[in-house]
Amino acid sequence: MGIGETMADMIAFPHLAVRAQDLRSIETVERKCRGLQELKYAEFKELFAVISATGLLPDELRLLTDSHAPKMVAREMVRIARLFSLVSMKTLQRLSYTHPLIFEGAQGVLIDEWHGFHPFTTWSTTTNANANVLLSEIMYPDVVTRLGVVRAYSTRHGPGPFPSESRELTMRLPDMHNGFGVWQRGFRVGWLDIPLTRYALAVSDGTDSLALTHLDRFASLSQKRVVRAYRVAKADLTEKEKSVMVTDKEQSNDDYLHIVSFRRKDILEDLGYQEMIGAILAKVTPVVEDIQCSEECFVDYVSELLFLPVDITSHGPTAFDKRERVQMQLAA
């Protein structure tokens, strides 16, 4: 994958980072690619003999040693860039007067660089924050609707805290688009985790309604559950850990806390806060509830638990499998 290494290099060597504006000039891209080649050659040259002897990674070795590689890569990057339009904010503003603008989150909120459970995160902001800033900068004139997309069950690709994980569900619900990868490892599945979904919504920078997806796959399960809360022994927690939790006092007692979510931190760059939530998640026991009602009842129940309307449901992979519940409710 290499995204983490790319971001680390961008921070350490910003003058070599290839940015969107550079893609207008093949000379600029080639110069930066050559600088990156020299940088990585120096970093890995002591391993070349070992890697060459194994016969592994021939393409990677060629990219670091072939003097023509920077030009080849630059040409390909510029060729791909010409398939798209690199536009200014003024262009985006003009489009907003006549066309709806759609921003799609690249990854889940729970691996956001600032709000995910460090260090098991991506290197970018996956909340609504960037879209909110863009819309503000162009003074977007219309109503903004922020839709939170949630599966009927929880998933995580690769390592990291996942209290609701179920090996049985992982086997029953394989994902054709998320197989095992050398870098990200396996795709994991668990029951819909209400406390973590509430936390994701709390840090999302605004969510107006929900789209509940994969209901067709959830319906195929003979046993259906959700994780309503977590239970954790008070003796296992520090006072600082207790301060980040949202608890149900009626369900808690002298020995145990009943956790229903976590608080959003005050300082965005405080990754220690995120590590602390991850440490807490390693101590909790999920409070699991069996679901014994119709699909429509389940959708309403999720809406009730997350304090937001479910406006869209998805029952398959195509656009024809999506249903707008708002229209159904108005018709009723």
Image (cartoon, rainbow, N blue to C red):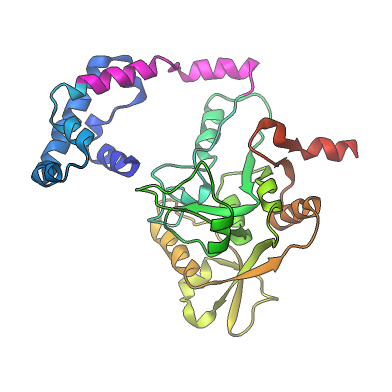
The residue positioned 48% from the left and 45% from the top of the image is: 178
User: Left or right of 42: which side holds 256?
Assistant: right
User: Which is the main secondary structure of the residues drawn in magenta?
Assistant: helix
Question: Where on the picture, by quarter, is residue 285?
Answer: bottom right
| Residue 204: x %, y % from top left | 56, 46
- Name the outermost residue toward the right: 332
Of 156 and 85, nearer the camera is 156
Closer to the camera in the image, 81 or 142: 81
Determine whether 12 is above or below 69 in the image.
Answer: below
**In the image, is 17 to the left or to the right of 269?**
left
> Can residue 29 be seen in this snapshot?
no
In the rendered image, residue 278, in percent from the top left (x then y), is placed at: 45, 63
Query: Is any atom of residue 156 visible in this view?
Result: yes
Q: In which quarter of the image is the N terminus?
A: top left
Please give the name of the residue rendered at 29% of the width and 38% of the height, measured from the top-left corner: 6
Start-end of magenta stretch:
71-100
Whether the magenta-drawn stretch holds residue 76 is answered as: yes
Q: Position of residue 193 (x, y in %)?
A: 60, 59
In percent of width and height, residue 56 lies at: 20, 42
Q: Closer to the camera, 276 or 51?
A: 51
Q: Does the magenta stretch include residue 80?
A: yes
Quarter of the C terminus within the rendering: top right
Above or below residue 255? Residue 289 is above
Residue at image location 43% in from the left, 61% down from the top: 273
Q: In this view, does 93 lie to the left or right of 66?
A: right
Q: Residue at x 53, y 19 (%)?
A: 92
Q: Is residue 280 above or below residue 45?
A: below
The image shows a total of numbered marks equal to 0
